[in-house]
Amino acid sequence: MKCKLIVSFFLLTAGFTAFSQEKESRKSTGKNTAVVEKALVKVSIMYPYAEGKTFNMEYYETRHMPMVAGYLGSNLVKYTIEKGLASGIPNQPLPFMAIGTFYVKSLSDYQASIGPNRDAIRADFPNYTNISPVILVSEVVK
Amino acid sequence: MKCKLIVSFFLLTAGFTAFSQEKESRKSTGKNTAVVEKALVKVSIMYPYAEGKTFNMEYYETRHMPMVAGYLGSNLVKYTIEKGLASGIPNQPLPFMAIGTFYVKSLSDYQASIGPNRDAIRADFPNYTNISPVILVSEVVK
């Protein structure tokens, strides 16, 4: 478990520079500037549901996410939190207990901001969950 | 595969009325009305990546999602589309190729709108993907 948690936070260092640069150049074309979120990068930390897994939403909302958001500076456009309620498919288990998402302008800047704070973020994990998250880096299409 | 696709669309009929009613009552308290999205229900159709899976984003963005959105009327607050780029964890596969999300006021109204159009939606599936989606019903916390 501990190993998995550590691995999870290597996202902070890996090389998504190429993606980030693509976003930067796209934004500079000025296309669709009316839609603020379009072409932003989303980093979604997704907590899969499974038997015996726990998640303290109150702590996550009031302590953990504000802490991480505080590291991101002006690169952070917004962040969102959602609480999983059910699968949309009958007789299927809940896919995710929670998802936290950072909308950022630059993924490389995100990584540069998070890197020095990795230990603090990692140490806060057991305060709200025993789940190893799945992390999706995606592009806002619409 | 076909069976799985059919099962996927039973989301349109299942009973999330309880969740929906909870949202309605919460909204009526007027708490946090400044944050428009808070307490909305999200229905996220998530397309897992796997070897051999395909996804036509252009068709999804210009044809499929507008079609489904058109069924939802004033219950639909907005919908979003994101394109998966990478896992945020090194050496892990991309979790999802794409995610489409409907933000609605009422889940029961969503189901009532989609139900009569289930066949049309189902028939459109093979036009853009061979993936059986995971569907998450969640609540906007922040």
Image: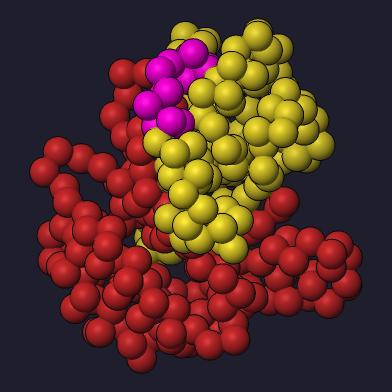
Chain colours: A red, B yellow
| Image point (59%, 82%), residue name | A75
Q: Nearer the viewer, residue B93 or B141?
A: B141
| Image point (49%, 84%), residue name | A72
Q: Nearer the viewer, residue A127 or B130?
A: A127
Q: Is residue A69 above or below residue B57?
A: below
| Image point (21%, 75%), residue name | A124
Q: x%, y% of residue B86?
A: 51, 58
Q: Is residue A64 above or below residue A87?
A: below
Q: x%, y% of residue B13?
A: 49, 13
In the image, B67: left or right of A90? right
| Image point (48%, 20%), residue name | B11
Q: Which residues are magenta?
A: B9-21
What kind of secondary structure does the magenta stretch mostly adopt? Answer: helix
Quadrant for residue A40, please give it.
bottom right
Q: Is residue B39 above or below residue A80?
A: above
The number of discs equals 0
Quadrant for residue B63, please give it.
top right
| Residue B124 shows in this picture | yes
Q: x%, y% of residue B89?
A: 38, 63
Which residue is the extreme one toward the front? B29
Which residue is the extreme one toward the bottom? A116
Which quadrant: the N terminus of chain A? bottom left
Can residue A21 be found in the magenta stretch? no
Q: Is residue B131 above or below residue A107?
A: above
Q: Nearer the viewer, residue A98 or A13?
A: A98
Q: x%, y% of residue B88?
A: 43, 63
| Residue B126 shows in this picture | no
